[in-house]
Amino acid sequence: MAVSETVIRVENLSKKYVIDHAGDKARYESIRESVTNGVKGLARRLLGRGSANRSPTKEEFWALRDVSFEVKRGEVVGVIGRNGAGKSTLLKLLSQITAPTSGRIELDGRVASLLEVGTGFHPELTGRENVYLNGAILGMSRAEIKRKFDEIVAFAEVEKFLDTPVKRYSSGMYMRLAFAVAAHLEPEILIVDEVLAVGDAAFQKKCLGLMGKVSKSGRTVLFVSHNIGSLTAICHTGLLLDRGKVIHRDDIWSVAKRYSSAGDLGPTQLEPNVFRGPLRTISFQQIILNGRPIGARASVDTTSDLQFVVRGRAIEDVPDFKTTFSLFRDGVRIVTMHDTLDPELMPEGVFEVTYTIPSNLLRPGEYSIAVGGRRVAGDDWIWATDLAVVEVIPIWGPNCDRDDHGVINLPGRGIRTVMAPGVVASA
Amino acid sequence: MSSTKRVITADRAERQYWRDLWRFRELLAFLAWRDVAVRYKQTVIGVAWAIVRPIVTVVIMVVVFGKIANLPSGGVPYPLLVLAGMLAWQLFSTGFSAASDSLVTNGNLISKVYFPRLVIPLSSIAVSLVDFLVTLPLLVVLMFWYGATPTWNMLLFPVFVLLALVAALSVGLWLSALNVKYRDVRFVIPFVIQFGVYVSPVGFSTTAVPEQYQWLFSLNPVTAIIEGFRWTLLGQSDGLTPLSLAVCLGTIAVLLFTGVRYFRRTEQSFADVI
């Protein structure tokens, strides 16, 4: 039976990277440290070779570890995971761009991977020339490109500019042409990275439509995206990666749900030094979202309430204190909540403040948390932004307005009134 | 379209690789064509550059070596001697320097698409062959001008052209793979080329070198290629010694074999490093 045939078999796949910390010292090391490291390294090289290969600036990092899974013919798999979970590495291994450290992959069928739209486009070449070049890069033969040429050009809507260098194209035309070439690949296995994340809304719609068509054509597709909404629309099954491991492999809804509820296991204690302000008698220690302490990231689906508990401590009685909780989106402060209307006494000891945001109020997207507080007297305050990011994931309940545009989903709808025939719109 | 089974493991599958290389032969042609097509865009005199540059170089060398230093040319008009040498040297040097840079300049392809990476240096060497073919008529014209009569040796000319290309490839493979990891290579190449013109008999004949030092020139693998050009084109055989030919063939064989091996061993990590 063709349906149950396995076309991708991945066994114990691992990929190790060696990170050279000396390379990004600006980020992770102070200048003094890197200078000392440099001098130490030089000294070691000059004086002895004993410890030469045990350089402290090199660190092993397993992007993927012992990953095994199978994909059947015609299956459309959504690969989900946070940044650094190993999604891109997996795609790169499957598309043979880089080799695994260990383990094996078996692929049955012609593979095409689309990790980027317009790879190899040359700005000086004309649209026509780039179609041929890009097609060849993606693995099409010249005869094949020739056969599909008119179709590609029609899809991209650039007929008039075929003999214009693409550097003179608008970015929309450029993207359309690049995507058109990729769209006319006919592999048995298609591997797609977040190419849909680029371009304007109309273009994204076109891409999504095409992905939908591909997924119905019986081809096997592996699709990585951050956009859970489009994944659930297109894919049948999902693969959840977390820190280089497959932690869930099931139908797409189950995987998306699991992804949205998976907590972040990073350090969950707030660092005192991220807080600014002169107020020293109050400190904040932890943010708890729906019963789980959160680290740098957390996610929640649209159908759940968001209950934030902020835990803190007062070193002594603070007579007139008021806590503040805020959510930012793209730098804009969306939500500000307080625990009291007017400043009140915060007695010495540990305190918790609970802020609740009802479900279906925040539209899907990423929200950044800020926490602080203020005394009325002496303009004494404490404040920290970007403490954690909460991602609201589009998993829709039965009565939702399924839309991820905008920020706030107000209850209620517009009311539609249909006029009787013959009524003319007038000023 | 045949259903192809493919196994990817940590150690490379040799058979599959060469089959892929064959499958991507059109890409090789496309990349070469791209480089040629792009080269002279936005230049005023365009392809004429491929003629102007060698002419200027030849004139300078004729003046310096032929007129000022007054070196012997072995009965051949000095400009012909230099141009034949220049053609060989340029084919080799532009070939290997383009190949050495090729992986780095095509880094965006390497990190986004799979194809046998050998396609890239091969295509850049194909580009230098095209340049060479554009310059070649210049020599034909000059030979008519001086009334030089072609000999049957001419039939062997393609063999030496091929030799120059393979030599460029063997060096280019090493340098291109090294260049991915150690960008120092970029700084070394112009130096090597500048230096190479003088340690190879480009502007003068090997016979012009004092007898006791001639064996030193024979140790330069490029010597046999240059003198081979002169032998097949101009019928001047004094410079092409058996020793130099043996050194040339031996060096190329060793470099090519080890170069392919090194390239194959490192190419799987190109995408991680580039």
Image: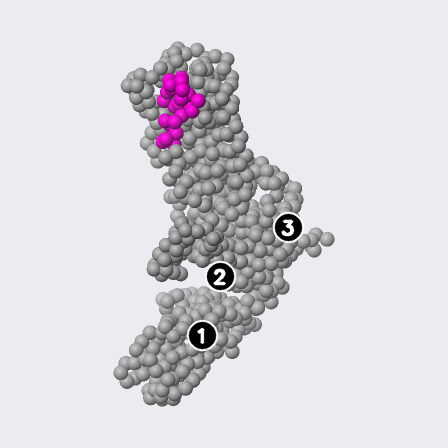
- For the residues labelled 1 and 3, the Cα–Cα distance comes to 44 Å
Q: Which residue is mark 2?
A: A83
User: From which residue to which does the magenta span run?
Assistant: B193-217
Disc sitting over residue A269 in the figure = 1
Q: Which residue is mark 3?
A: A106
Which-is-in-front pick, marks 2 and 1? Answer: 1
Residue drawn at point x = 64 percent, y = 41 percent = B1
Co-location on one chain, circles 2 and 3: yes
Quarter of image, res B86: top left
- Name the spot of residue A345 as percent of width and height, x first: 36, 89
Co-location on one chain, circles 2 and 1: yes
Co-location on one chain, circles 1 and 3: yes
- For the residues labelled 2 and 3, the Cα–Cα distance comes to 26 Å
**Considering the numbered disc 2 on the image, is that residue within a helix, a strand or a loop?**
loop
Question: On screen, A253 above or below A104?
Answer: below
Residue drawn at point x = 50 percent, y = 69 percent = A264
Upstream in sequence: badge 2 or badge 1:
2
Q: Are marks 1 and 3 in contact (CB under 8 Å)?
A: no
Q: Are marks 2 and 1 in contact (CB under 8 Å)?
A: no
- Name the spot of residue B174 as percent of width and height, x first: 48, 38
Q: Is residue B186 left or right of residue A147?
A: left
- For the residues labelled 2 and 1, the Cα–Cα distance comes to 21 Å
**Considering the numbered disc 1 on the image, is that residue within a helix, a strand or a loop?**
loop
How busy is the neighbourhood of tag 2: few (under 14 within 10 Å), some, or many (20 plus)?
A: few
| Magenta stretch encompasses residue B201 | yes
Work out whether residue A252 can be spotted. Answer: no
Residue type for callout 2: Asn
| Magenta stretch encompasses residue A129 | no
